[in-house]
Image (cartoon, rainbow, N blue to C red):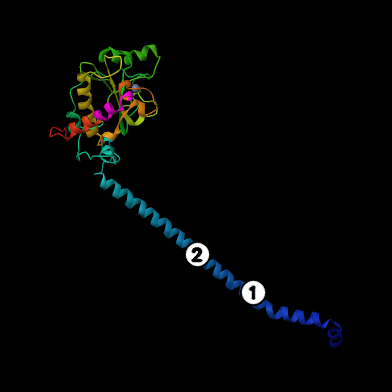
């Protein structure tokens, strides 16, 4: 036995002895490292769960705050959205019926018009909902001397002739009469990229330069004043078709910037009088 030990390489013998001594220590180190990692994993898992829980609670609270801030109507009606319009005035709180997406009382204050809706059809009255109104566009008919009724017929005919997708919510005749062609809670086809969030008004005219008659102008001011107030917009949200795409429409007001500015001032003056709508 002694002889066989002596025969062995002393360095190897020492190495093996060290290994035997270290092994239990290494195993212990590994175990405690594994335990620490498991603890860290558990802590991370708990932190993740707490974070998710907090985010969930925050979402619920935010939804509740939004719902309460909007008088509970944020999910209910278009008019509810209008009340929340950040661009301008606030409609008085209301509960109850809406007409054409507006509170009954707001709708009832509109200027006189003849309601003569187009027949629903994909060319001039597609029936898609108008869910928000950010701007109001003014147009001219590009056809001097034609009446509001004639222009309404032109829109109506599109269901048969199927030539153009064209319409507007309102047409104002050169005698100042207003015809409503499309309800205010439906889109019209008037400004290609903005049909989804705007109201459009077509104006008839007599003069070749496209200037509106005084009667058309007066009715336009009344209608614009009511619409801006109804939708809580300021007069900067009254736009020419020209302002969206550069089409020369309404012609006179694209060539006479001062006249256009005056028109918006006249709307502001109309809203500034005691005789406001709401
Ligand atoms: Zn136009």
Give the vertical position of 45 relative to 217 (above or below): below
Q: Position of residue 201 (x, y in %)?
A: 28, 23
Quadrant where the C terminus is found in the figure: top left
Give the vertical position of 47 relative to 89 (above or below): below
Please state if 275 lies on the left or on the right of 181 as rendered: left
Q: Nearer the viewer, residue 179 or 95?
A: 179
Q: Nearer the viewer, residue 264 or 102?
A: 264
N-term mark: 2 or 1: 1
Q: Position of residue 239 (x, y in %)?
A: 31, 29
Quadrant hosting residue 78 = top left
Question: Does dot 2 land on a helix, a strand or a loop?
Answer: helix
Query: Residue 42, which numbered label?
Result: 2
Q: Residue at x 36, y 54 (%)?
A: 58
Q: Position of residue 131 (x, y in %)?
A: 32, 33
Number of residues whose C-alpha sits closer than 10 Å to that of mark 2, classed few (under 14), some (14–19) or many (20 or more): few
Quadrant where the N terminus is found in the figure: bottom right
- Badge count: 2
Query: Residue 246, which numbered label?
Result: none
Quadrant hosting residue 3 = bottom right
Magenta region: which residues? Answer: 254-263
Please state if 16 lies on the left or on the right of 212 as rendered: right
Please state if 15 lies on the left or on the right of 97 as rendered: right
Please state if 163 lies on the left or on the right of 152 as rendered: right
Number of residues whose C-alpha sits closer than 10 Å to that of mark 1, classed few (under 14), some (14–19) or many (20 or more): few
Q: Quadrant of ligand 1?
A: top left
Residue 244 visible in rendering: yes
Residue 98 visible in rendering: no
Does residue 259 belong to the magenta stretch? yes
Q: Determine which residue is flagged by label 1.
A: 27
């Amino acid at each position: 036995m002694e002889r066989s030990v002596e025969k062995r390489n002393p360095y190897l013998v020492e190495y093996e002895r060290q290994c035997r001594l270290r092994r239990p220590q290494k195993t212990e180190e590994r175990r405690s490292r594994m335990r620490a990692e498991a603890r860290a994993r558990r802590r991370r898992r708990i932190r993740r769960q707490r974070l998710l829980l907090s985010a969930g609670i925050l979402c619920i609270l935010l939804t509740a705050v939004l719902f309460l801030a909007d008088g509970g109507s944020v999910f209910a009606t278009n008019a509810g959205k209008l009340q929340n319009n950040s661009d301008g005035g606030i409609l008085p709180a209301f509960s109850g019926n809406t007409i054409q997406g507006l509170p009954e009382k707001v709708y009832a204050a509109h200027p006189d018009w003849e309601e003569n809706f187009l027949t629903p059809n994909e060319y001039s009255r597609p029936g898609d909902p108008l869910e928000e109104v950010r701007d109001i566009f003014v147009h001219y008919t590009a056809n001097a001397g034609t009446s509001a009724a004639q222009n309404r017929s032109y829109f109506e005919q599109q269901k048969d002739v199927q030539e153009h997708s064209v319409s507007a919510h309102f047409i104002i005749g050169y005698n100042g009469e207003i015809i409503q062609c499309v309800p205010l809670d439906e889109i019209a086809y008037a400004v290609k990229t903005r049909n989804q969030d705007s109201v459009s008004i077509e104006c008839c005219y007599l003069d070749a330069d496209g200037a509106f008659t005084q009667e058309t102008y007066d009715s336009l001011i009344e209608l614009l004043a009511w619409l801006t107030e109804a939708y809580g917009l300021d007069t900067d949200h009254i736009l020419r078709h020209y302002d969206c795409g550069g089409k020369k429409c309404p012609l006179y007001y694209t060539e006479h910037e001062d006249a256009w500015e005056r028109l918006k001032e006249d709307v502001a003056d109309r809203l500034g009088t005691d005789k406001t709508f709401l």
